[in-house]
Image (cartoon, coloured by chain):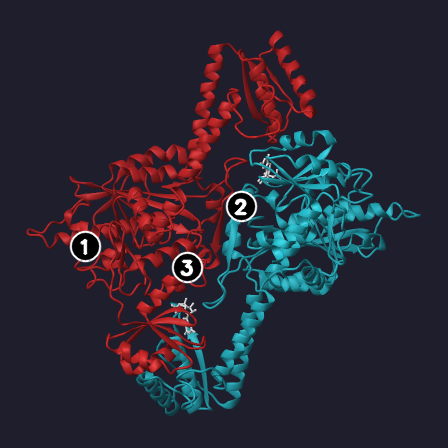
Chain colours: A red, B cyan
């Protein structure tokens, strides 16, 4: 189901009930870019610590826009012994909802845009019809703005600041506006004594409108309803209506309801994420660290600086996560699966020893055909991510005695995979552990090497050729980590390097220490 | 005429000849945003100096993308006594052209994107079919890369750096690649002794390809043509062909021509800007400072830091500019024209005392109908900018004795308007003078005032209410410039403020001095 600004409101209850009835959810996001650093690989060094990796992704990836969000809900039907799916493809765009709303800037990376364009991605749908959203801070601010305005209109706004115009009469009208305001008062007095129901004042500035509200609320505390109306040309004027108390209350209540609706519209897509979050359901994704980071950053709060705090926020928003790329890279799957990229994984998980899961789409929902791939539409990617999870979960059931063909999303067998998010291209730390401390592999055999920028990988192989197998992790064009195969070789390498002019070596421990010094003084 | 990546090459000669035959050109650009600062108006203070304004626009506006460029050429036909137009609408996007090409990041501002979306702007056309481009630096780099590769393939590349692998045999093959390379040599020897014409080597890494080129060029200096070919799956392998000397030269020349074509494709839209620049023709725009800045920044070079250097570059790229917004804001037009926004200006310039110009579109080109506006398509905006220029130029002719109905783009009457680009919202400096020093209005009557952030414009009016008319130019929410109507009032204001607690006053001269100190120490 494709959801845009146009059908968002009417579809929301469908989304809510799909989430509520589901056994688990799969999600996927499409972004306007991945990294604003010099190169993606400089961002993902093979020797990053979890803290370093999180810090780099936070710094270099969060200014991109998550502009398509895929959600696929999976409900297991016992009687049919199959899963029933509902998949949603949300287009998302921070359309400014009023003159004072935040004007979001986001970065686009031409390689990412070009890639999506080549897949037929519909940018017009994003920019013309994307659903708006607010994070929690913006939502409260907007709520406060509405309340403040309401107070001001009721005349109960008290200016609490030092201003040359405060501390005088109840309504202090500056000289240059005195004429204007007394003309307004005359018009309203005329209204009160004639048979008309309303009078439209002339368009005027925001400051003048404030003066009008203050003056009229003070002079005519009862019997009037005052409202700002916008013309087609976006000019604003004030409309004054004669009302009795009951009518006045009714109109005010209507106004409040209208405001609540405006607020809901502005919160927009964030409401879907809130629903996913509140459901507490298992949320499955493929290589989902960036998806989780973007979702929290865009719809909850700017990401915290420290990894520990990020883990805490994540556990609040998504209490149970599962990353199919991490699952496929872990035993017993690791030995059976050669390629863990989403499309390849999905293919392999249909073949022996795995089994294609039995799945049907619910009525009124798009039925994706995995034979004719629709890759990189977020809704489709979420769908096949869910299929991968089911296949792998069911495979775990074959080890039980007696074997079980269906393993539910709540099974104990799945628990070891909870809240471990795949860490791309880190040599010795497979995942980020969201609900606990991270792995701390020894790095005694790792050297930090600096050299002239003309060096290539082959030069490093040459340099360490005496030591047999080495592993190179480029940092930038004048430095890299080199992992030796044996710890004992480290001292030899350090000794030899003392007399070298073109390159320099430090142990990993020395490197981390001096790095720490740099950032903490 | 709509020009995208698909029809760019075949349309280029049409563009070139339209530029060559034209009497003048009109241009317009559409951008992905205007300002990444806190607010557009904070970017355009009423008391900016030209240097300050240029610096702010350079810093806060150049990371947006110019993604649609409108060009309309105007040629005067004496016999028909009317202008003939050709209008072009170019879609522009920095599609990465190879694996090593720069991966441009650009900012989008949601208000600008939303505005264009509401006008029906086609983002899919930009991102799927935009014409690529290179600036001059990138163009030379790419040219050098091609040359370097050619040298390397001819075996004449000399590594000029300190490397543990240099200074040994002619081709130093690392141990782990020795087997691979000797298998390649065997295959080529087999080719030389059998009746086949070519042999395809297996796909391999860039480093291995380099070794192959070096080895084969060294072992078989004659009789072979070696070339890297890409499979459909983007794997690269080397193809070796047996050739005699003549054939070899011919193939190498073909290769060079192919490379030149690839280079031209990569330079892309910049070639159009080069053509406009070389033509030396008058280039007309409406409120064109940002258009000029973006055009130079994107297609020539990153903008220089200093305004003086920017003026110099601009005069090289666009030797004759004319801004219709500045022209319309200058006498004799200023008194006749109430609204200088493009759409309004165009309407007014059809009415008395002006005359709608006689214009026809050339065959094969889109004829815009100014009655049904197509505003904010760059090609249309360029077209009506040209119309405005013609109307105003011809109006100047009515002052001649005898009056002349047609004033050419080369007329002396136009010269006073050359190279003066409209400065938006600067109170006392109407334009940036590209070909000379800027105006330096006295600012003796201007105060720099700081105050609590709760203050509003009305508080400032209140504060200076004794001095009659004042003009407020907000800087940010705790400071503003206040222009008094008489210089003599400055001293009085300064004296009074000495005892004030909530606000502070400096003269404009004091403010500039302390600002200067801050930025230069
Ligand atoms: N001097 C040098 N730097 C390299 C080389 N290969 C990679 N780098 C640097 O290391 C960074 C990461 O390299 P890599 O992981 O190979 O990824 P990629 O360059 O993005 O394809 C690059 O951005 C370069 O700055 C090399 O052969 N020589
Ligand atoms: N404290 C205060 N700051 C203001 C007020 N009006 C404008 N500003 C500040 O001055 C900047 C420029 O204001 P303005 O030229 O009115 O443009 P706008 O705020 O973008 O519509 C704003 O971004 C605010 O920071 C005001 O009434 N009070």
Where's residue B281, x and y in %? 74, 60
What is the distance, in whole Å, between disc 2 and disc 1 at their CAs? 46 Å
Query: Do pointers 2 and 1 mark residues of a single chain?
Result: no
Chain letter for mark 1, please. A
Camera-nearest residue between A364 and B146: B146
Camera-nearest residue between B213 and B287: B287
Query: Residue B520, located in which quarter of the rendered image?
Result: bottom right
Placement of B90 over or under A174, stated as above or below: below
Where's residue A501, x and y in %? 42, 81
| Contact check, label 3 and label 2, Cβ < 8 Å | no
Residue B113 tag number: 2
Query: Do pointers 3 and 2 mark residues of a single chain?
Result: no
Describe the element under mark 2 as helix, strand or loop: helix
Which residue is label 1 attached to?
A: A355
Query: Residue B206, located in which quarter of the rendered image?
Result: bottom left
Camera-nearest residue between B349 and A155: A155
What is the distance, in whole Å, between disc 3 and disc 2 at their CAs? 43 Å
């Amino acid at each position: 189901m494709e959801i845009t600004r146009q059908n968002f409101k009417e579809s929301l209850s469908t989304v809510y009930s799909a989430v509520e009835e589901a056994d688990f959810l799969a999600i996927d996001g499409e972004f306007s870019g991945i990294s604003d650093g010099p190169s993606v690989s400089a961002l993902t060094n093979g020797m990053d610590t979890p803290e370093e990796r999180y810090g780099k992704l936070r710094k270099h990836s969060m200014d991109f826009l998550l502009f398509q969000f895929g959600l696929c809900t999976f409900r297991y039907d016992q009687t049919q012994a199959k899963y029933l799916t509902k998949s949603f493809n949300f287009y998302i765009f921070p359309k400014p909802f009023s003159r004072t709303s935040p004007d979001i800037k986001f970065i686009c990376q031409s390689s990412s845009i070009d890639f999506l364009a080549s897949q037929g991605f519909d940018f017009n749908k994003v920019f013309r019809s994307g659903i708006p959203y607010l994070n929690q801070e913006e939502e409260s601010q907007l709520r406060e703005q509405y309340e403040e305005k309401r107070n001001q209109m009721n005349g109960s706004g008290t200016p609490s600041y030092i201003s040359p115009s405060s501390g005088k009469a109840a309504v202090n009208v500056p000289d240059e506006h005195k004429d204007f305001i007394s003309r307004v008062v005359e018009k309203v007095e005329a209204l009160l004594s004639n048979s008309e129901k309303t009078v439209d004042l002339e368009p005027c500035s925001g400051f003048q409108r404030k003066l009008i509200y203050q003056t009229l609320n003070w002079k005519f505390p009862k019997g009037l309803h005052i409202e700002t109306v916008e013309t087609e040309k976006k000019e604003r004027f004030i409309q004054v209506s004669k009302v009795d108390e009951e009518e006045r209350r009714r109109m005010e209540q209507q106004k409040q309801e209208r405001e609540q609706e405006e607020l809901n519209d502005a919160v927009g897509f964030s409401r879907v994420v809130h629903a996913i979050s509140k459901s507490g359901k298992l949320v499955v994704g493929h290589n989902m660290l960036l998806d989780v980071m973007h979702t929290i950053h865009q719809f909850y709060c700017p990401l915290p600086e420290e990894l520990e705090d990020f883990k805490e926020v994540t556990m609040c928003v998504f209490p149970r996560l599962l990353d199919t790329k991490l699952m496929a890279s872990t035993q017993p799957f690791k030995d059976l699966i050669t390629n863990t990229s989403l499309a390849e994984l999905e293919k392999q998980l249909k073949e022996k020893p795995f089994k294609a899961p039995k799945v049907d789409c619910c009525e009124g929902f798009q039925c994706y055909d995995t034979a004719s791939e629709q890759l990189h539409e977020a809704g489709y990617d979420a769908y096949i991510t869910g299929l991968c999870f089911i296949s792998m979960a069911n495979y775990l059931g074959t080890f039980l005695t007696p074997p079980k063909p269906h393993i539910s999303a709540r099974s104990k067998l799945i628990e070891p995979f909870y809240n471990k998010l795949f860490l791309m291209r880190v040599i010795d730390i497979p995942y980020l552990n969201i609900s606990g401390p991270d792995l701390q592999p020894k790095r005694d055999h790792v050297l930090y090497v600096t050299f002239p920028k003309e060096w290539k990988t082959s030069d490093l192989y040459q340099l360490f050729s005496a030591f047999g197998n080495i592993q190179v992790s480029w940092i930038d064009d004048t430095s890299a980590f080199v992992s030796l195969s044996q710890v004992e070789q480290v001292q030899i390498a350090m000794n030899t390097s003392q007399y070298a002019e073109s390159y320099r070596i430090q142990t990993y421990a020395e490197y981390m220490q001096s790095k720490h010094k740099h950032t903490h003084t």
